[in-house]
């Protein structure tokens, strides 16, 4: 993991797994790889930011980057994340709005920084499950992932803004085991790298 300087801003790129880190992205940055899911993402991001803070070198921005599922957006398309929610947090039985963690001050949906002018944006929802089929009907978002909300909460603890870049790897039909997810990753690597270049030029 190394911070990347983009137009004078020290930027930390965060990814779930090296499966998504192909040759095009490798040529552009050295990411923090957190592991899959909200717990791993929050833990790894919090530890990394804590270490950077102790050394006096917090980044100016964090970018959560990788794949996402969607039944609304085209396979292979790349999107800037407009907002993120947590679709499997549900404490409604004690009177807390769905998506809100009890006894915290965050709303169910939170906006992210959108530093790339002209790149289309979409709403994202994070959860601890791999979404497929009719599960999409129960989620109020354009696409889903397993990390970005957790990364955001870690960033908020340290006062660092978060941006998100996601490429749609799956969604139409049922996911066909691991291969159904990895089939699009080479294409997304190249297209996400092009989005990173636009971030550099923003």
Image (cartoon, grey):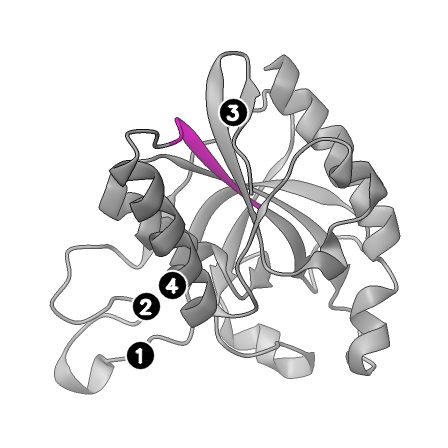
Q: CA distance from mark 2 to mark 1?
A: 6 Å
Q: Position of residue 72 (x, y in %)?
A: 69, 58
Considering only order in the chain, which callout, 3 or 2, is on the residue closer to the N terminus? 2
The circle on residue 90 is 1
| Sequence-earlier tag: 2 or 1 | 1
Q: Which-is-in-front pick, marks 4 and 2? A: 4
Q: State which region is magenta.
A: 59-64
Q: Could you tell which of marks 3 and 1 lies nearer the N-terminus?
A: 1
Quarter assignment of residue 170: bottom right
Residue 99 bears which disc, if any?
2
**Which residue is at the far bottom?**
93
Badge 3 density bin: few <14, some 14–19, many ≥20, Cα 10 Å? some
Nearer the camera: disc 1 or disc 4: 4
Q: Residues within 10 Å of mark 1 (few under 14, many from 20)?
A: some
Which type of secondary structure does the marked residue at label 1 adopt?
A: loop
Q: Which labelled disc corresponds to residue 115?
A: 3
The answer to whether marks 2 and 1 mark residues whose Cβ atoms lie closer than 8 Å is yes
State the image coordinates of residue 78 (x, y, percent, origin top left).
72, 42
Of the residues under marks 1 and 4, which one precedes in the sequence? 4
> Can you give x and y, in whole percent of width and height, for residue 93 in the image?
20, 87
Q: What is the x, y in percent for residue 86?
A: 40, 65
Q: CA distance from mark 3 to mark 1?
A: 31 Å
**Secondary element at image label 2:** loop
Q: Residue at x 82, y 66 (%)?
A: 182
Look at 57% across and 75% down and name the residue there.
137
38 lies left or right of 54? right
Q: Is residue 68 left or right of residue 147?
A: right
Name the residue beneath numbered marker 4.
Answer: 43
- The mark nearer the N terminus, 4 or 2, is 4
């Amino acid at each position: 993991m190394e911070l990347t300087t983009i137009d004078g801003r020290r930027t930390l790129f965060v990814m779930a797994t090296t499966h998504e880190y192909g040759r095009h992205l490798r040529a552009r940055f050295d990411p923090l790889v957190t592991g899959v899911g909200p717990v791993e993402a929050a833990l790894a991001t919090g530890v990394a930011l804590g270490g950077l803070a102790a050394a006096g070198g917090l980044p100016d921005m964090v970018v959560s980057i990788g794949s996402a599922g969607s039944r609304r957006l085209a396979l292979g398309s790349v999107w800037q994340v407009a907002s993120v929610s947590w679709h499997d947090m549900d404490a409604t039985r004690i009177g807390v709005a769905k998506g809100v963690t009890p006894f915290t001050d965050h709303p169910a949906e939170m906006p992210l920084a959108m530093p790339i002018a002209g790149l289309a944006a979409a709403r994202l929802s994070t959860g601890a499950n791999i979404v497929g089929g009719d599960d999409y009907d129960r989620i109020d978002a354009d696409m889903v992932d397993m990390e970005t909300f957790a990364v955001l909460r870690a960033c908020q603890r340290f006062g660092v803004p978060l941006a998100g870049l996601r490429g749609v790897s799956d969604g139409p039909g049922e996911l066909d085991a691991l291969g159904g997810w990895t089939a699009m990753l080479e294409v997304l690597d190249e297209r996400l790298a092009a989005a990173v270049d636009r971030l550099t030029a923003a």
